[in-house]
Image (tube, grey):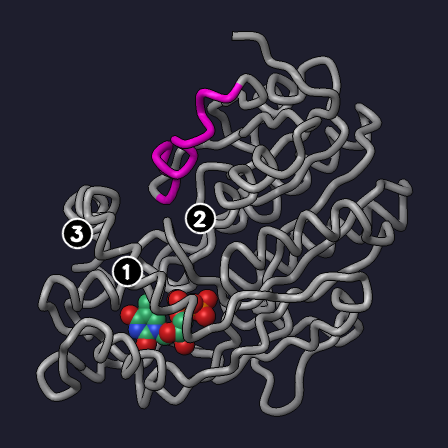
Amino acid sequence: MAFVGQRHWIVTGGLGFIGSAFVRMVLRDRTDVRVTVLDAMTYAANPENVREVAGDPRYRFVRGDICDAAAVREAIGDEAAAIINFAAETHVDRSILAPEQFLKTDVLGTHILLEAVREQGIGRFVQVSTDEVYGDVEQGSSTEDDPIRPRSPYAASKAGGDLQVLAYHNTYGTPVLITRGSNTYGPYQYPEKLIPLFVTNLIDDTPVPVYGDGRQVRDWLHVDDHARGILHVLEHGELGNVYNLGGGNSRENIEITKVLLEATGRSWDTHVRHVTDRAGHDRRYSLDASKAMRLGWQPNVSFEAGLRETVEWYRANEAWWRPIKSGEFREYYKTQYASR
Ligand code: TYD
């Protein structure tokens, strides 16, 4: 099938949770854009995530690692107008068990992409990053000018990537942008993260592991709002700038747990286990997203409605997550949780 469309965008990690939401949205809302997904197909990637667009003549897939310059060149082909980098190792608990792959993908991989942008004169590079680079925020909210103080191997790897991106802008004038999203939830999220893990456990009548006292605070953002924010920054952001994309929904983990118990008809006494806390666990993240809002973006999905719909999605899409939970995930779950 012909690969048509005026502008060519490379979406790395486009088979993952946020990347695939971005790909589905772009192919729906930007009819003059064609997309090449470059994805290494690690455990968190899933071709099902883009199934509804995979037959679109504006969609193309290249299997490959962002650390592999030849794969990056193959994805770019003759030219590309933008690279949007979603490819990353993202799970804090996995980074505590085995940090090395995080450095490879999140730091070295970002470097390889920046080199491609520089060599091939690509017009935009968007680095999709995270509020975790700011570290634990006792009070108030992080602004883009705040110092970064990452505290987990994952957050330190993402911070390393961000610093390379900013250094390339300063040194070579590379046309970069960084988004820092808050905790993201919604359909197609790999069930190692808090919300999909708890929802799928509860559907399965299995207890959920709450770390420590469960009073840690995260700021929740729906994946569609997140994807739209990244697109907005790509199209309107000022080069060399960082934009926080926060959902404005600060909740303690135990509040989320209560909502999920209620939505699945389970009770606290039978379905919650307080387990040993995560090592070095950040107590609170909070983003000041006013800079992105001044640029014209704002989150639209109400947290209550979004969470309800997410539970419904996991209920209706067992065929998506059951194979995941019975595969590699089972070993991971044992390693992560058995001794807690
Ligand atoms: P997570 O979804 O892993 O995102 P992040 O660590 O990037 O914020 O975790 C969200 C919060 O939920 C965090 O405070 C850790 C907590 N959590 C649990 O209490 N139990 C779990 O099994 C998981 C995966 C997370």
Residue 35 appears in the rendering: yes
Residue 151 is situated, as x and y percent measured from the top left of the image, at 54, 72
Q: Which residue is at the front of the view, 55 or 163? A: 55
Q: How far is disc 2 from disc 3 in space, using C-alphas?
A: 20 Å
Q: Which region shows up in magenta?
A: 44-56
Query: Based on the displayed image, in which of its 4 quarters is residue 48 positioned?
Result: top left
Query: Which tag, 2 or 3, sits closer to the chain's start?
Result: 2
The residue tagged 2 is 17
On whether residue 55 falls in the magenta region, the answer is yes
- Front position among marks 2 and 3: 2
Residue 3 is situated, as x and y percent measured from the top left of the image, at 60, 13
Label 3 crowd (10 A; few <14 / some 14-19 / many >=20): few
Q: Quadrant of ligand 1?
A: bottom left
Query: Which tag, 1 or 3, sits closer to the chain's start?
Result: 1
- At mark 1, the secondary structure is helix
Query: Which tag, 1 or 2, sits closer to the chain's start?
Result: 2
Residue 21 is situated, as x and y percent measured from the top left of the image, at 50, 45
On whether residue 148 falls in the magenta region, the answer is no
The residue tagged 3 is 330
